Structures are given as structure tokens and as C-alpha cells.
Amino acid sequence: MSATEKAAPAGVPSLDVDPFSTEFFEDPHAIHDVLREAGPVVWLDKWGVYGVARYAEVHAVLNDPLTFCSSRGVGLSDFAKEKPWRPQSIILEADPPAHTRTRAVLNQVLSATAMKPLRGHFTALAEAKVDELLSRGSFDAITELAEAYPLSVFPDALGLKQEGREHLLPYASLVFNAFGPPNQLRQEAIERSAPHQAYVAEQCQRENLAPGGFGACIHARADAGDITHEEAPLLVRSLLSAGLDTTVYGIGAAVYSLARFPEQLAKLRSDPTLARNAFEEAIRFESPVQTFFRTTTREVELGGHTIGEDEKILMFLGAANRDPRRWENPDRYDITRRTSGHVGFGSGIHMCVGQLVARLEGEVMLAAIARKVGSIEITGPVKRRYNNTLRGLESLPITISPA
Amino acid sequence: MPSITFIHPDSRRQQIEAGDGESAMQAATRNDVSGILAECGGNAMCATCHVYVDEDWLSRLPPMGDDEDALLDGAAAERRANSRLSCQIKLDADLDGLVLNLPDRQL
């Protein structure tokens, strides 16, 4: 783990916090506050990068993709200087106009229109899961609910074979650790990556994807000429990378929030139509995806500072989502809050392309809880999981009672 | 700076100032116009920024793309001849005075 030699730019507040350390993962909120209050733009001495933690600047960076580009990687590693650890993503790690074409394909495959036929099945499985958990009473909400439910719906929706699905969560964890700096989390994840990468590369091939699933739909778009047959597997890979673990963390965040704010659970029970917004608010409140980087393509003014070309900037999405300049009572989980504009799914052209799948899973699970569960009680030690990008729990022991 | 007016289902009129180059959806969310949900943030994926365009303005808007057309079929509120997604209406000086009616629901 090598810290950088790069000196802090004049006039920019320099901080020595490491946003990729265990201490930070355990309690980011106090440090987020320090980062926000230090100034609109800060310098992170440990890794030699700029940082933005206020809503206005995070939003501005996300919405100027030509100045703050993604094609040089959305992690710390600059693809202009370092070979990517895996073949570069043709959507996440791409800029317009290349990005526009690939994004259009996934936009359609994962649009509201595509979600409609899935809703009934997703709802039935959410209700069956909650019934099963109610009959058990006490269980770990992370493995038995937050992981189990997305695993029961998403791989099938994608069209994956049954065999080998145990690689899915480790692969996603690897991808999100790899956006971080060369710390132990990243190094170990990459060292152990070979079997997971081999599995994923294989599943992206057309013959391994069931007809009617998201994967087959992507390959069909290659037949239509919208993308090439070489590009289709790489777009399927994006769904395997970012389509599962994120919803695991999102649903985990929602259940953890409802467990800590019983009056919000009561509100949800009295009006189950709040389920979709209760999930959305959990995404703002916990920000399962905490950070992403961009790289400057030119000299640019940001927050009163001049930032040079070729600089990495770390965006603290979680800090922006609790910036008191933008949110009233930001540290309160409030399921009736107007959540529009939160950056938990990002913002602009790279805003999470799987967001409607995530919302569907989150909504139907919270609606099932609203109708069937009377109370949620945390009954054991809550353990945090450490990842360079994702924020969530390793273990959440709870007891639930029927409504 | 075009000025646009949203008419809520209860007939309340809300006039807002939009920035040049902003979409009607962006101007609405920035000004906290309830009734524009805009879940997908302008990526033309969700149809939760559905509006009914005032008849006088309809022909002055840019034509609808295939994505928008398909999404409007699945909009929560009834699709009408003057239905558009506000994220696809880019505002400029020519659209100063635009009037958009809000549907009763977006989900």
C-alpha cells in the first residue's frame, strides 16, 4: 500500500483521512461532515486526489461527463497510466459518443416497459420469502433476506444457468473493491479473482443465457445491429458486475433502516404504497454505493478552485446524500421525504442503468414486509462488511413478528 | 431564461424559471414541482416525468423518439395525444411561456 508523493495544490484544504480504511467504513458520517465543511473541493493527501463531498459539487461533476470523464476508469486507477485489471467496461468506463450507443441498448433492455412482465413473479417470491422468514421468526437479515431474495429473482431474470451462481457475489464484491486504491482489500480481491472471472466470462456468452432473459435481449440487439457481437458479452458482464450485490446492499440498507426507525415501519405498515419511496429513501440514507472517481480532461473551475487536466476526483455520494445544504434533517430516515435528486444511483448519463430492477426488487420486498410484518427487532451484534465502494452489513440478526 | 408553467391536477398553476438548455423535467425537479417524479433522472427509462402539453404548444416541441413513444404506452396515468416525457423537452428561448399539465399520478 503506497501513499502518494503528490503535493497538495495551493489553497485547497488538505486532509489526511483515508476513505478506504476500516475506521472510515465503521463510521463514515463524522468524517463526511469534516470533508463537507472543509470546503467545496478538498485534497486527499493519502491518495493524491481531489475530493468532493457537498451535494452541489458532486452533482456538478456527475453532470459534466465530458470534463469529468469515465473512460480513464471510475476507480483510483487511471487507465491512461495503468492497464485495467480486467477488460475495460464499454458502458461504465466509456464516454460519449461510444457510451451513448451502448447505454441506449441497456436503457431499453432494463426500461420500465421491460419491468412490467417481471412484477408479478418478483412480488410472489418476495411474499413467499417474508412468509418463510415469519415462520422462522429469528434469522440473519443479510444472508437470509438481503442476499437470498435478489439471488432468487435476478439470476433467473438475467437468464443464468443454475450451476456456478456461487461465483456471483464474490465477483461483484471484487469489482467494487477494485475501484478502490491498491490497499489490502483490492489486492486480495484481485489475487483471488481468476475463478470468478472465468465463470463470468463464460456466462456472458450467448449459448449460456436463457431465452427471454436480459442477457438474451442484449445479444438480440447485436443481431439488430445496435452493437457488435463482440460487444454483447461485455454488456452482459455489466449486469453480472453491478446487478446483484448492489440490490443486496440496497435491501439490506432498507431493512436495517426500518429496524432502527420503528415509527417509519409503522408508517409503512399503515400505507404500503410508501414501499417504493421507503426503498428510495434507504438508498439516500445509507448510500450503498459510496464513491466513484472521475478524471479531468481539461483544466476546470470547480467550487472556486482551478483543477488541472488529468486529475482524479473522488465523489462522496454518501456525503452528498446527507449534505445539510441540500437535505432537511439529513440524518433522519423519513419514508415520506421527497427523495428526487439524491445521488445514490448517481446522476446524469451514467446514472445506474439497473435502477428500475433495483427499485422493483426493493419495492415489492418492502411492500410484502408492510403487509405481513408487525415488528422488526435487532437481536444480536450488527457486523459491518468492508468493501472499497459498497457500504453495508455482514450480519444483521433480527426477530420479526407477524402483523 | 425561459419561464414555464406547470398546472397541477387541482388546477393550481406553478410558474418556474428554467435555465437555458435544461429539460422541463430538470427545471421541475430543481424547483421541487411535486408531480414530476423523474426516477431515472432523464435517461428515458421510466416514464415518471409524464406531462400533458398544452395544445397551443404541442406542435412547437421537437418530435418524439421511439424510446419515448414506447415508454409513454406504459405511463401510469392515461396516455393522451398530447402526452410527452418532460425529460425529452429541452428548453430554449423559443419555448418561453410553455404550459405543461401534470397527470394525477406517475407510478
Image (spheres, rainbow, N blue to C red):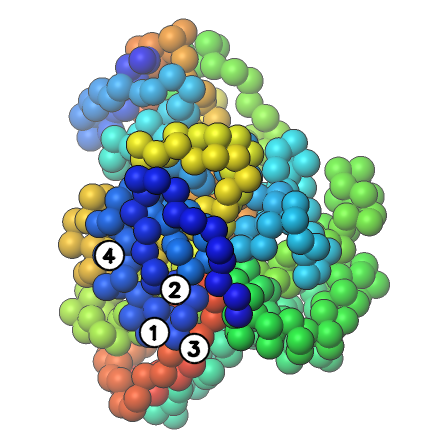
Badge nearest the viewer, 2 or 3: 2
Verify CB contact (< 8 Å) between mark 2 and mark 3.
no
Q: Which residue is drawn at the image coordinates 34% and 62% (left, top)?
A: A17
Q: Which labelled disc corresponds to residue A34? A: 4
Q: Quadrant of residue A199?
A: bottom right
Q: What amino acid is at disc 2?
A: Asp
Q: Which residue is denoted by mark 3 in the rendering?
A: A385
Work out whether mark 3 precedes mark 4 in sequence or the reverse, and give the earlier one: 4
Residues indicated by labels 4 and 1 sit on the same polypeptide chain = yes
Verify CB contact (< 8 Å) between mark 1 and mark 2.
yes
Residues indicated by labels 2 and 3 sit on the same polypeptide chain = yes
| Residue A196 location (% of width, % of height) | 69, 74
Q: Which residue is denoted by mark 1 in the rendering?
A: A23
| Residue B13 location (% of width, % of height) | 20, 22
Q: What amino acid is at disc 4?
A: Val
Q: What amino acid is at disc 1?
A: Glu
Q: Which labelled disc corresponds to residue A18? A: 2
- Pick the residue in front: A323 or A232: A323
Work out whether mark 4 precedes mark 1 in sequence or the reverse, and give the earlier one: 1
Work out whether mark 2 precedes mark 3 in sequence or the reverse, and give the earlier one: 2
| Residue B19 location (% of width, % of height) | 34, 20
- Pick the residue in front: A366 or A230: A230
